[in-house]
Image: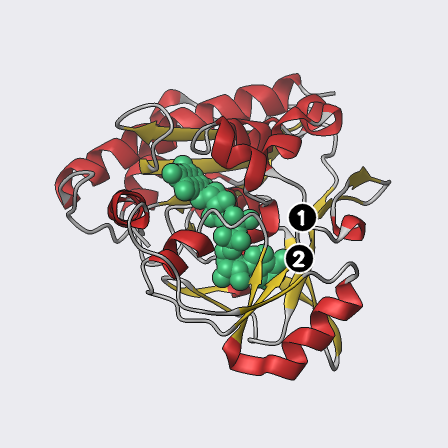
Amino acid sequence: MNGIIYVIFIVSAMTITPSVFEYYTPSTMVEAVNLLEKYGDEAKLLAGGQSLIPLMKMRFASISHVIDISRIEEMDYIKEDSNRLSIGALTTVDELGSSVTIKKRYMIIKEAADQIADPLVRNMGTVGGNISHGDPANDLPAVMLSLDATFMVQGKNGGKEIKAEDFFVDSLITALEPNEILYEIRVPKMVKRQGGAYIKHKKSAGDFSVAAVASNIIVDGDGKIIKVGVALTSVGPTPIKSTRAEGILAGKKLTEELAAEAARSITEESDPVSDFYGSIDYKKKVLRFIIKESLVAAYKRAKEAQ
Ligand code: FAD
């Protein structure tokens, strides 16, 4: 959903209250899944409430059973092992940005987390909620797409792993079934000579983006690009993973000219709409500029990362 809708929500939310609902506070993931199964389409998970509560206050979402998962401690962690970084879905955006592990090696995640909204929203909003909401203006989805993350999901009939690129179906629609919970986000462990950058262009501090770009690059010892992932925020009905970046950049050293050529081509994959944040033409111009900027920053970090 476009960020402008939030402005309307927030103004209106001061005067409107949600419809009546039953409220549950499970303390384990199993309890939450059982409640989801029991109440089906009439139930909704509540994590940080930063997206859901405004929707409920506006009565855009009429829900008769609210399952508040914010007390489930087993879903709040950041761990790294030899294969991957694992982020519990209830990790708050603030915890993500302040984590020593993230600061040390996952600068692309830190850059996105630190630019989400304001301290109040970051203290309450969760990584799982930011991703599950399916808002193409949210910042973490594009980062996860660029990093080839996967999402661990649990339902009554078992668990599954969904690739980030298969998760975002349409605006506010994801591959999650109504009775499923996202419990963990998995990111392949950063390797030697890997770097990433998240560049967000916004109208004012704390705002959603006009457009934003996540770039993730791995280089070899000669500085040639081995692997690249580029994903875009706020310029389509879903976050967009570029299908062209790899073909243009793999096997080459990044120069200013090559970055500009890639930016031109990747911009063609976007599908922005004209709204409060700018015209289609303006957004594409911004996008072209920040794709280049993020590629150059990610490439520099990749060459420096040992
Ligand atoms: P909730 O609001 O609790 O839930 C959102 C949705 O996700 C609901 O449908 C809920 O059922 C579902 N859900 C939550 N957790 C799970 C789970 N574990 N498994 C399955 N489904 C789940 N975001 C940005 O990225 N960038 C911004 O610049 C930005 N600016 C904002 C400014 C304001 C003023 C506000 C209010 C929000 C802003 N946001 C922004 C959104 C914010 O990051 C929210 O935190 C996020 O979208 C939702 O996270 P939450 O934990 O609050 O989820």
Q: Residue furthest right?
A: 82
In the figure, 222 relative to 19: above or below? above
- Callout 1: few (<14), some (14-19), or many (20+) C-alpha neighbours within 10 Å? many
CB-based contact (under 8 Å), mark 2 and mark 1 = yes
N-term-proximal mark, 2 vs 1: 2
Expressed as whole percent of the image width and height from the top left, the position of residue 56 reads 40, 60
Q: Which residue is mark 2?
A: 69
Disc 2: residue Cβ within 8 A of ligand 1's nearest atom: yes
Q: Which amino acid type is marked by label 1?
A: Leu
SS of the residue at dot 2?
A: loop
Residue, x 38% and y 28% (percent of image)?
A: 206
Disc 1: residue Cβ within 8 A of ligand 1's nearest atom: yes
Q: Is residue 58 left or right of residue 46?
A: left
Q: Is residue 198 visible?
A: yes
Q: Which amino acid type is marked by label 2?
A: Ile
Expressed as whole percent of the image width and height from the top left, the position of residue 166 reads 53, 65
Residue, x 66% and y 80% (percent of image)?
A: 37
Q: To which quarter of the image does residue 177 belong? A: bottom right
- Callout 2: few (<14), some (14-19), or many (20+) C-alpha neighbours within 10 Å? many
Q: Is residue 86 left or right of residue 52?
A: right
Kindly identify which numbered label has been placed on residue 90: 1
Expressed as whole percent of the image width and height from the top left, the position of residue 4 reads 25, 45
Q: Nearer the viewer, residue 92 or 85?
A: 92
Q: Nearer the viewer, residue 21 or 48?
A: 21
Q: To which quarter of the image does residue 173 belong? A: bottom left
Closer mark to the observer between disc 2 and disc 1: 2
